[in-house]
Image (spheres, rainbow, N blue to C red):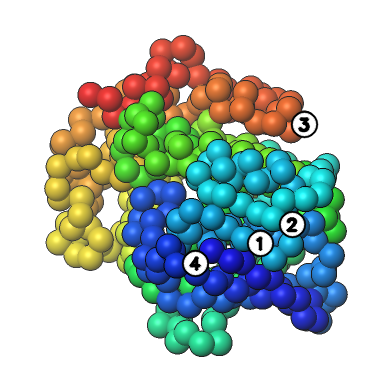
Amino acid sequence: MRVEWTYDEGVWRLTLLLDPEDEVTGTCTDGQRLEMRTSSCRVRLGGPDGPGLPSDVHPDLLATAAWTVAAPWTRRRVTFDRPVSPRLAEALAAGWGIDAGPVAGDPREGSGLAISYSGGADSMAVAEVFPDAPFVHFQRVSHPRVPNRWTHYRSDVAARLARETGRDVTVVQSDLEFTLAFPRPGYPEHHAVAVGALLLADRLDLGGLAFGYELGSRWLGGGRYIHRFSPDNPMWAGHERWGRLFAAAGMRMVLPVAGVSEAVTMRMALESELRPQLRWCLQGSGAIPCGRCGKCLYKELIQAAVEGRPMRTELTATSGPGRKWQQPPPYGGQEMIEYGCARVPNIAETPFAKAAEHLGATVESTRWLERCYPPAVEEVPERWRKQVDAYMRDTIGLMAEDEAGRVETWGAA
Ligand SMILES: [Zn+2]
């Protein structure tokens, strides 16, 4: 793969040029098959005529940003249009077995922390742990050469809500999701959400970027119910190599809420002063969540459990996303299904009635999901660990040893 970045009036444009061994069908870190639709994309700042993205960006940041788009399609080597540091090339070799070059120059360092902020409960929980950190928000915009069949996806609403938090917010717009033809527009790698923060890292003097990965996605195997210690857990292996690459670019990945479940991040978001800007569904009119998609149903289960009230949904066991819960487990996000089924009073009248029977979860059997898994705090880079540690000890509480054991044996049976 050859990678070219060009800069014009505040906008960075990325072009991927395939080598003979590369293919337009690839696989991203979590195992999803992807098909390339187009080989170029742009990144720019949102909002009225600001200064634009900086033109002077360390080559390791440009390379890392490019790699979040290029990784699925690259087989053996990547040739950047400006030399990367030896440290960055080593991270690509160690993580992907990729030969990267040309190699020259010094690695970069930075000091501050920004939050990759989506506006969902998990990133809002991160904002609670780091109330002074600026937000960088990724906004999908349409691609000049790819028709947008996803106009019902209101990325404009998410960007507006992020601005309405009143925090220090930079909205970065990109059409990089349209590089994918299959399965749909989306990040080639999950880490592509960070392209804007990477391109701004020198200007903002960033040494770390905080993401909203919670217990399920970091330690329990994503939505796939794969045992954490299994070598075939692609999320587990992926975290290691992406973490190493970002660190090589002087931009440490920081996961402040990786030790807590979505029940805890939901509670933190509901109690946040940013709650009026909370939004996890970008379908529908934009005024409110659609209430009809699988994500809305799943989040309503969690919110009802956290608030100790009946679920409010018009979906049934035979309608739309309700149907998938009529099968026996395993389920994606199963720990939260157990948590919700154990706590929601009218569960027998909801689409989760069958799942509740299969799972047989109780308040007691799911109590470990209300506290923080200590190793998640220990892996926070030292510069930011104290703040995460204090928050988790004082506000959430740490798991006891037997509760931590539930994390480590999850899905093993
Ligand atoms: Zn929805």
Q: What's under tag 4, amino acid-wise?
A: Asp
Q: Earlier in the sequence, mark 1 or mark 4?
A: 4
From the viewer's side, name the closer residue of 268 and 9: 9
Q: Which mark is residue 44?
A: none
Secondary structure at badge 4 equals loop
Q: Which residue is mark 2?
A: 83
**Which residue is depicted at the point 48% across and 77% down?**
38
From the viewer's side, name the closer residue of 195 and 77: 77
Residue 77 in the image: state x and y as whole percent: 54, 55
Q: Which residue is mark 1?
A: 80
Q: Quadrant of the N terminus?
A: bottom right
Q: What's under tag 3, amino acid-wise?
A: Arg
Does 326 appear above or below 253? below
Secondary structure at badge 2 equals strand
Q: What's under tag 2, amino acid-wise?
A: Pro
The answer to whether marks 2 and 1 mark residues whose Cβ atoms lie closer than 8 Å is: yes
Q: Residues within 10 Å of mark 4 (few under 14, many from 20)?
A: some
Q: Residues within 10 Å of mark 1 (few under 14, many from 20)?
A: many
Residue 220 can be seen, yes or no: yes
Q: From mark 1 to mark 3, how far is it between C-alphas? A: 31 Å
